[in-house]
């Protein structure tokens, strides 16, 4: 008996497909050159934040796996990794939120609607948080 398998194609850089989609929306829906330039810069900033978030998640996953493999690890060792990860994640989320609101402030309601439309199939979550490889 054989089952169906589905390979998920990962973006080279986490969030890059999402950023490319947003860049193309800015190109299509924003006419003002200076506004377009500012929005593109903000998209790049947000893409960098998403990349950093992905890198940090991978780093903390590895740290957590290392703590788990260490027989002498204490609950405090786990708490330390979780605490550092949560602080980093919260800072990056706040940075991303700031960027999004800067983008929104540059746009009219109609422009923002065109830029912020989200399709489930775009799968930003899957790009950002692929299943970690266990070594």
Image (cartoon, helix red, strand yellow):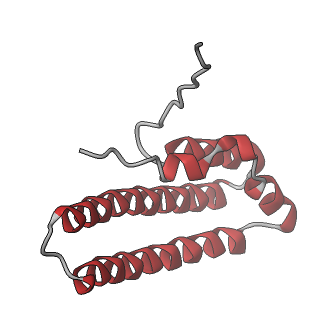
Figure check: 124 above or below 103: above
Q: Residue furthest top?
A: 1
Quadrant of image for the N terminus: top right
Q: Quadrant of residue 51?
A: bottom left
Q: Is residue 132 left or right of residue 16?
A: left
Along the line of sight, which residue is nearer the eye, 70 or 135? 70
What residue lies at 80% left-to-right and 53% top-to-bottom? 114
Please give the name of the residue rendered at 60% of the width and 19% of the height, measured from the top-left corner.
3
Residue 15: in sight, yes or no? no
Along the horizontal axis of the image, is 119 left or right of 98?
Answer: right
Residue in the picture at 21% in, 68% down:
67
Horizontal side, residue 106 vs residue 63: left or right: right
Q: Position of residue 38 (x, y in %)?
A: 57, 62
Examine the rendered structure and indicate whether residue 59 appears above or below residue 79: above
Q: Which quadrant of the figure has residue 17?
A: top right
| Residue at far front of view | 1
Across and down, in percent, residue 50 comes to: 46, 59
Viewer-side residue, 66 vs 2: 2
Check the picture and name the quadrant holding the C terminus. top left
Near-viewer residue (85 or 11): 85
């Amino acid at each position: 008996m054989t089952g169906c398998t589905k390979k998920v194609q990962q973006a080279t850089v986490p969030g890059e497909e999402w950023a490319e989609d947003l860049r193309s929306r800015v190109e299509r829906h924003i006419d003002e050159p200076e506004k377009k330039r500012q929005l593109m810069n903000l998209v790049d900033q947000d893409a960098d934040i998403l990349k950093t978030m992905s890198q940090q998640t991978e780093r903390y996953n590895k740290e957590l796996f290392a703590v788990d493999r260490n027989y002498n690890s204490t609950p405090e060792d786990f708490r330390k990794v979780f605490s550092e990860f949560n602080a980093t994640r919260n800072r990056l989320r706040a940075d991303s939120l700031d960027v999004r609101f800067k983008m929104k402030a540059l746009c009219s309601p109609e422009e923002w609607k065109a830029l912020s439309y989200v399709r489930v199939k775009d799968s930003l979550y899957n790009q950002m948080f692929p299943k970690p490889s266990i070594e």
